[in-house]
Amino acid sequence: MNKPKMATEKGVPSNSRVLMLLGQLERMNGEAMVRDVEMARQVTTKILHLIQTQEKSGKEVMSKSSSGMEVILASLEVSSLIRRGRRVGVFVSKGGTGILFQILITASKDLPPSEELMLQLHSLLAKVGPKDRKFGVKARLSGALNVTINLMKQNLQNTKLLLPCLQVLRVFSTNSVNAISLGKNGVVELMFKIVGPYCKKNTSLLKVALDALGALLKSKTNARRAVDGGHVPVLLSLYLDWHRNDTRHRHMLIRKGLLVCLRNITNIKLGRKAFIEADGMRILYNSSTECLPVRTLDPLVNTSSLIMRKCFPKNRLPLPTIKSTFHYQLPHVPAVGPVAQLYSQPPGVDDVVDESDDNEEAEADSDTENEEDEKDHHSANDDIETDLNKLHPKKSPGRPFEELRVYERFFLELSEDFQVSVFSHALECASLEEDRALNAEEGLKGVKQEGSPVNATRHIQSPLLLGGITTRRVGGGGSNWGSDCGSEGAEDEVGEGAVLEVPDTALLLPLHDPDLYVEMVKGTHSVPQYAEVAYPDYFGHVAPTFREPLLERVYGVQRSKIFQDIERLIHPNDILDKVVYDLDIPSCPVIEDNGESLKFNSQFESGNLRKAVQVRKYEYDLVLNSDINSNHYHQWFYFEVSGMRVGTTYRFNLINCEKSNSQFNYGMQVLMYSVQEAISGRPRWVRTGTDICYYKNHFARSSIAAGGQKGKSYYTMTFSKNFSHKDDVCYFAYHYPYTYSTLKMHLSKLEALRTPQIYLRQDILCETLGGNSCPLLTITAMPESNSNDHICQFRNRPLIFLSARVHPGETNASWVMKGTLEFLMGTSPLAASLREAYIFKIVPMLNPDGVVNGNHRCSLSGEDLNRQWQNPSPELHPTIYHTKSLLQYLAHIQKAPLVFCDYHGHSRKKNVFMYGCSVKETVWQSNISATSSYLQEDLGYRALPKILSQIAPAFSMASCSFVVERSKESTARVVVWREIGVQRSYTMESTLCGCDQGKYKGLQIGTRELEEMGAQFCMALLRLKRLTGLRNHQHLLDLESDIIGTQTKVASCPTTYVMEEDEPSFLEAIDYSAESNDEDAEPENEHAGEVHEHPEHLDQLSDSDTNHRD
Ligand SMILES: [Zn+2]
């Protein structure tokens, strides 16, 4: 045969050769069906002959071979290209595997079967198997499993034959149904006869046997079989034996194989029990500690750590109950819903700890064939709304106008004629002052004065914070304080009785006023009746001028933290377990001691710390309080620490986090505010903390207490901090705090920014359950004059409706809102144009109660207010009810806003982005067919985010989504779009972490960037105005298309459906699943019975001695 020209392209000629030979094989196989035994014998003979010439090169075999079978086997085997794939791929795709199995079956009927033939066939199958997705099923259906098992049973001492059999068995076992069937036939026991203690001989065989055993033990039935057979101690002592003797680490893969067996057995509760009883924790802990210095042994350390974490006995949180410490009696408890569920739980339900794993459903294997079904259809796409009726936005008839008429008073600008007190705002001012006075008065009655760190004379007598130190404010507005780098006074230690200089932030923080803040606090109603003021909120925060890059994670941090956790079990005597702060003892949450412990406190607005336990000298477990009337939603934190030693690294563990992943694994740091720094002229929150990571811990709750939700396990967020000042008082927070009292102070100070050209009105929309008022702002420009034309222009301005902070833990939303408000009240020509263009209606804090009480997600009703928009209750969700009513009123008078936007924070993504609503893009993302009428949609909803992506550095268009999800059908965005008919209805999500694109790429987000975002949102509205201001609608569309790209362009790349998280999985991720960083770790959360026959994966299991990647 002529050598083809393309011979340099490896594979191609051989592929065609394989194809040709396969044809011959198929014909032979057809004949075999007819003349079976006789033909099989012939083939056997030929193969035997072939094996004798096996050593020769492929070319030689090709030229000598006369039969197709020989050629095929030879070309596959000799070239050993099998691993490289292409020929095998062709072979498999044309049905080669099935034919090999048939030959195997036929050959096995000879008694005794030819050893050489069996050897040859298994060697081939071992190489074909990993490339054939259906290999396991074909093997079982053809009956080949038993052939291999029987052969092995009869040849346990024949290592030459045993090796290829084990290699094939390893592939068989990755199929879950096969694994069960093999287990029933005694293969687990058989494997335990093969694996043995340290021995330099037959290590390849041992490695393959362990791989096969590991695969078999993934089946829970097999795992139980191994436990019942007493093999857990056996595996542990084998591991220890190899660990001790393999001193040069030549057999790391065998040691790893043993650990994988233990890892799979400990997936079942019985296995974990057996592991603990066999002293597995100590054995793996000690061996791992010895492995730590050798980096190449990382896979062993990681797998050991994974096993130990799983087996670590689950503990309850150190709390009397996981229900929130504070209780708020609701006017009525709705019949259904989270609160009803919480209060109908049997007593003691949260005393129970569920020992099962989150991912472990029933401890039984399913015998059904489901691994071949394409199971990946579920996933996030299930959440896409497919009901076209719900997708077609239509104004619901809503409520009768008579009912809505009362909201007219919030829209005075629409009726005001400016004839009487033209351009005066005395009235509005007066009403605000009255409100404030009222609040202050009420506050005085409710708030305990003793213990308050602040009093009217500015001499701070703080028993908790800075005992004995008096304070006075420096300067009188023109102080030299303020430059970020100017004050170097940090080393001045403030001793007892020293004068504490309170920073004067007036110049830098025009909206901040400490005295006014204290006044505001007095009018704020909290369920725990807080009487203290946290210093950061009192002093204010001046954004630092330096950059705060995303924290680079140090290799092995999580592992070392986990080892420290495991040491609690190994060395229980080292653990102090001393409670130093406990809100469940209301009389003395701060537990006095001899100065050997840190002091904690969070009894101030937005504070959230329930308990602090000193576990070691410099390590504390911290427990966050649940949202009121709830037993979960822990994420937000804000607490005070004092009594620290300088030069000592403290470790803090927030042990009852709930989300399964966190930006703390991806560069986010906690925020810290040092009072010493503040009084030295640097009053600011800074990103801080080292050794930060987030992982599943050994604390759990009962699944019933968790409301039947999946997450029974808690997660630890850990960070370390070395304090730099003696006698400091420091505050830690999840994100830049922004209290309700801060909002009230800012709103009050906004009045001072008013000019005669600005129309600013502040109303109280309603009272919250907790008795706090919910402010509503109206901002626009005063009419140019009281001429009819000007009044008419004034009234006809389109409305922009903004809201924020429905979720209390998303404080960043408030900082963005602050940026928006300050811009709107600004003196720039742009701000003036903007005010002339629109009337702004703003509810800056939709959930004051949640904010005040340190909740993360809910209001006092124990519910997520952003899931109540479809049917808000006037009693339980007043702020939502009345905000929606405002919008309904506007819809009724034909003045539905041009833009609605609700500001939020996002804990699992970077950048700032928007969610909007589009029928078309929702239909595109789902499989529903819709008539084209549904698809004719104005693209206007894309204009605003597109403009933002062009002007706001933190904003990322790529993260935006315009898909309507079912789970979001009761959110502000969807309801305002669907019921009020606002096409441009958005949620704007700001990252809590930082940016991975644009000007701020690689940096954590700060208040400056958040406020800038709020200002740029305004700028974008101005640009939008230029588009929408045009009369000709078609022209508008063209223009918008200009901005957002041509229609076809948009059509060709609709936004992808954005899932919850967008981080790539971390090498050392948070869960048990991907925690080990060697590549054969597979997710533990695979459903039982679902095993992937994944070729690459098996390749990595191969017995080659190639080193694993780090
Ligand atoms: Zn939110």
Image: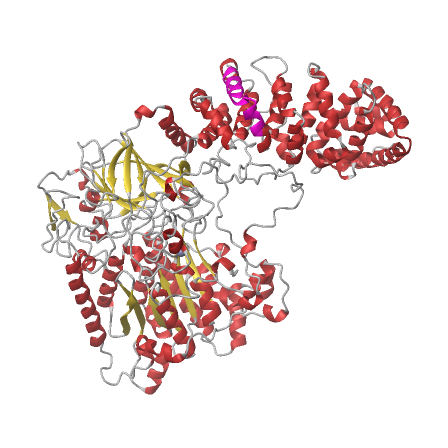
Q: Residue furthest front?
A: 346
**Vertical relation: 537 (above or below) 98:** below
Residue 719 horizontal side relative to residue 482, left or right: right
Q: Position of residue 286 (x, y in %)?
A: 42, 20
| Residue 49 seen anywhere in this rendered image of the structure | yes
Q: Tell me where residue 701 sits by quadrant.
A: top left
* In the displayed structure image, the side of residue 536 where residue 56 appears, left or right: right
Q: Quadrant of ligand 1?
A: bottom left
Residue 236 lies within the magenta run: yes
Tally of numbered tags: 0
The vertical placement of 646 against 901, above or below, is above
Q: Residue furthest bottom?
A: 788
Q: Quadrant of residue 781?
A: bottom left
Residue 636 image position (x, y, % from top left): 34, 48
- Return the x and y of residue 681 as percentages of the image width and height: 19, 47
Magenta span has 789? no
Q: Which residues are magenta?
A: 223-241
Pick whichever, 561 or 853, lies toward us.
853
